[in-house]
Amino acid sequence: MLDIPVLISGGGPVGLMASLLLSQHGVRSLLVERHSGTALTPKARGINARTMEIFRQCGIDAAVREAGLAEGGTGLIVWTETLAGREIERRVPGRAIARNMAVTPVKNCLCAQDDLEPVIRRFAEAAAPGMLRFNTELTSFTQTPEGVTGTLADRLTGEETAFTARYLIAAEGAQSRVRRALGVTMEGEEKVYDSVNILFHADLTRWVADRPAALYFVEQEGLRATFLTINGRDRWGFLIHSPKKYGWSPQDFTAEFCAELIRKGIGVADLPVTVLGVSPWEASAIVADRYRVGNVFLAGDAAHEMPPTGGFGLNTGVQDVHNLTWKIGAVLRGDADEALLDSYHDERQPFGRIVTRNSLANAMSMGRDQRRSNVLPRREFLNEQGLIFGAQYESMAVVPDGTPPVMPDDPVTEYLPAARPGSRAPHVWLTRDNARISTIDLFGPHFVLMTGDGGDAWRRAASAAAPSWPALITHAIGAAAEIGDDGHWLAAHGIETDGAVLVRPDGHVAWRSRSGAADPEAALRAVFDRLLGRMPVHALSSQGAQALPAGVTETRMLAVTRP
Ligand SMILES: Cc1cc2nc3c(=O)[nH]c(=O)nc-3n(C[C@H](O)[C@H](O)[C@H](O)COP(=O)(O)OP(=O)(O)OC[C@H]3O[C@@H](n4cnc5c(N)ncnc54)[C@H](O)[C@@H]3O)c2cc1C
């Protein structure tokens, strides 16, 4: 009998990241993937800046960038009648403009899923040698009071192995059998439109070199499609929208027919084109009603299936396991009560719904369901700063500080950096040992307590009580402190020099105190007891946090994503 703390079912990007993150939290896991290797086709390509921040935290951002398209290889979105013919419009996506890029130390990245997965796999295997098993399928499972038991099957030999695990993460993709077996309901709109994804080889350099774009839409009578940039030269995706509308069914898409449609999209009848793969699929916009059932967690496409318009599927899945894995680590180490694990659903499911709904709205605005014939999308498309950075959680794993959430005018397109508990801790440039670092670089597989340079009492309190707390690192930040700041950090975090901000291992603010406290040790102890489920949620009320005076103007900089 194989006995493992965490079993991960599914070795797509989300399962692979779950494995790597668990290793970084010191948790042993076994990942099983029924296929012989990682993805063969480049479905996702757009890695958004929040996901790149997570990759940076894990130390894999440079390798991902190396595997992806060189910087500057995209930057536009182009609409054409044919690639060689009339251009209808070109736009710079909101995500790429300087003001929006200033909220993060990283840049988004275009890295096709079949190039990305081997990178994550390499790091995950190095962190957990022998603990990623391909050609291995989870074939059955049962929940017990102690965890999960079940059977793994070797797809080459047919050999079966019984296992027992404390937790199961089902990162099995949209067709997850674990999800079905749990009786979880998917809410939303299913099979909204059809599509065919073609991978092909052809040199398109002469039509794209002077207008590097991530997407080239083709809008003509009898064909609506998108060229998806992979290497920007000779490897491309071609997405045919709503083929049923033209009377085409999946079996019509032979290699010859696909090549003919690709040439039609390029507008050059005799261009050599080699079709490498064809996959018909249907877009749904559905979200699991429960992300946790007992000791089983759904993550990635198993928890939410969304149209790719906006490029959120993989990104949202990676962010799911970034949220889940530190909580599993805290519970397995005995630092936290099991109840902490409920906050995974409470935090990620509402956000999954918002992202899914907006991905669908993008698709609808371009008439993907054939109810409209719009060519150009709604202005939110690829301009979703609020969805990328603005997730703001409310759960037992966040201690409110009494400040009201402030809605940006448009929570989809606008992100207002804020350190209100629940939000992503804002990025501020700092200096350490004469080098420039981001606040984001301070976060990792531990809690971080940041104080101003007058926050000695908080730091003393933290070290006095540290043995009874989960891994906690403290930093003083200020002109005269260990980490230098030119004055932006305090304002960005909404505290005085004697205040403190506690950041969770996933980079979200857990708690903050605007200034000092009468008994900082008691205050911090109460905060951790609440965060880790060691005391009832209502018992903390305003203890521990120095509440902001009513009506302070700081609330103007707080962001929330409106449901
Ligand atoms: C055309 C297209 C373009 C896209 N573009 C983007 C984009 O730009 N950005 C973005 O973020 N997303 C994009 N997506 C979505 C993205 O591809 C998915 O969200 C992503 O693949 C989900 O990852 P996952 O790990 O959850 O699931 P998957 O990638 O589906 O992986 C699940 C894995 O689990 C395995 N598995 C299932 N059951 C078992 C079992 N019982 N035992 C063992 N293994 C099992 C499967 O074999 C599979 O390998 C796009 C999708 C499409 C179709």
Image: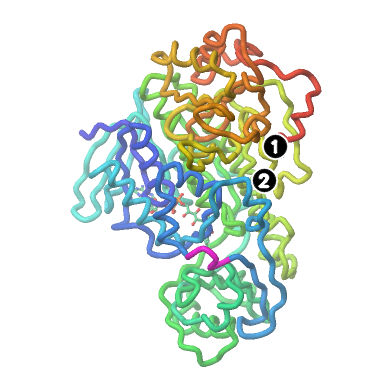
Q: Mark 2 points at which residue?
A: 386
In this view of the protein, can residue 243 be seen by the observer? no
Q: What residue occupies the far bottom of the structure in this picture?
A: 270
On-image quarter of the C terminus: top right
Point out the tag, 2 or 1, that comes first from the N-terminus.
2
Main SS of the magenta segment? loop
Residue at left 33%, top 41%? 140
The magenta stretch is 70-74
Residue at left 61%, top 72%? 216
Q: Position of residue 436 (x, y in %)?
A: 51, 43
The answer to whether residue 420 is left or right of residue 28 is right
Q: What element carries label 1?
A: loop
Quadrant for residue 409, please give it.
top right
Residue 229 is inside the magenta segment: no
User: Label 1 neighbourhood size at 10 Å, few (<14), some (14-19), many (20+)?
Assistant: many
Position above or below: 503 against 544: below
User: Label 2 neighbourhood size at 10 Å, few (<14), some (14-19), many (20+)?
Assistant: many
Residue 142 shows which numbered tag?
none
The answer to whether residue 434 is left or right of residue 406 is left
Residue type at mark 1 is Ala
The answer to whether residue 221 is left or right of residue 331 is right
Residue type at mark 2 is Gly
Residue at left 36%, top 44%? 9
Q: Ligand 1 lies in which image quarter?
A: bottom left
Q: Mark 1 points at which residue?
A: 559
Residue at left 71%, top 39%? 562
Q: Where is residue 492 in the image (x, y as percent from the top left)?
A: 66, 34
Q: Distance between the residues labelled 2 and 1?
A: 8 Å
Q: Position of residue 147 (x, y in %)?
A: 35, 27
